[in-house]
Image: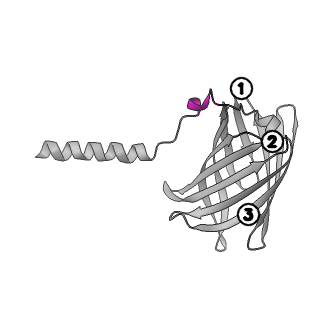
Amino acid sequence: MKRRVLLSAAVATGALLGGCATPNIDSYANEKPVLDLRSYFNGTLSAYGIFTDRSGAVVKRFTVLMECSWTGNEGVLDETFSYSDGSTQKRIWRLTQGADGRYTGRADDVVGQAQGQVRGNAFHWTYTLALPVDGRVIDVQFDDWMYLMADGVMLNKASMRKWGVYLGEVTLAFTKKI
């Protein structure tokens, strides 16, 4: 009986941990179209997005206008958010391209430095964002995935967690005239 309990606990733990696993960026290495982050995030882009809470309910809708430019391996992504409640927000990312498809990023509301990597049609990066919520600021961890599609469309899905607890998800569709 004791052995069955231990085995059941081991299986349950494995299933729980497997449910928290994130895909491996290398699994996208052969996917097309190939994402050149510097080329895609260059010029003017638009994005349309939603934030859903942990139950899947849409809490906020928004649009983003991005003005992007690169000088050498340094990029600036100037984002202007317009929310359905009439509020606006600004975020300016400063990206640095490294070796092997790796990128780092900073913004005023990013705690520390974002770390990411491109493979095939995908870009995965992680960062902590200082989010204003009900008059205070909380640090929320983002696990952010972008997938280049055809015709200048990129889909973006970012899960948000605080102390490992799932809070919700941000979903975006970027469009760029090609």
The local crowd at label 3, few if under 14, some if 14 to 19, many if 20 or more residues have their Cα within 10 Å, is some
Q: Which residue extends farthest front?
A: 151
**Which percent across, then down, holds residue 88?**
79, 67
Give the residue pinned by disc 3.
62
Give the residue pinned by disc 2.
41
Q: Which residue does the image show at 49% across and 54% down from the upper left?
A: 164
SS for callout 3: strand
The local crowd at label 2, few if under 14, some if 14 to 19, many if 20 or more residues have their Cα within 10 Å, is some
Magenta residues, start to end: 25-31
Residue 171 within the magenta-colored segment of the rendering: no
Residue 60 falls in image quadrant: bottom right
The local crowd at label 1, few if under 14, some if 14 to 19, many if 20 or more residues have their Cα within 10 Å, is few
Give the mark nearest the N terminus, 2 or 1.
2
Q: Which residue does the image show at 66% across and 41% down from the upper left?
A: 147
Give the residue pinned by disc 1.
99
In the rendered structure, which amino acid carries the disc numbered 1? Ala
Q: Which residue extends farthest left?
A: 1
SS for callout 1: loop
In the rendered structure, which amino acid carries the disc numbered 2? Phe
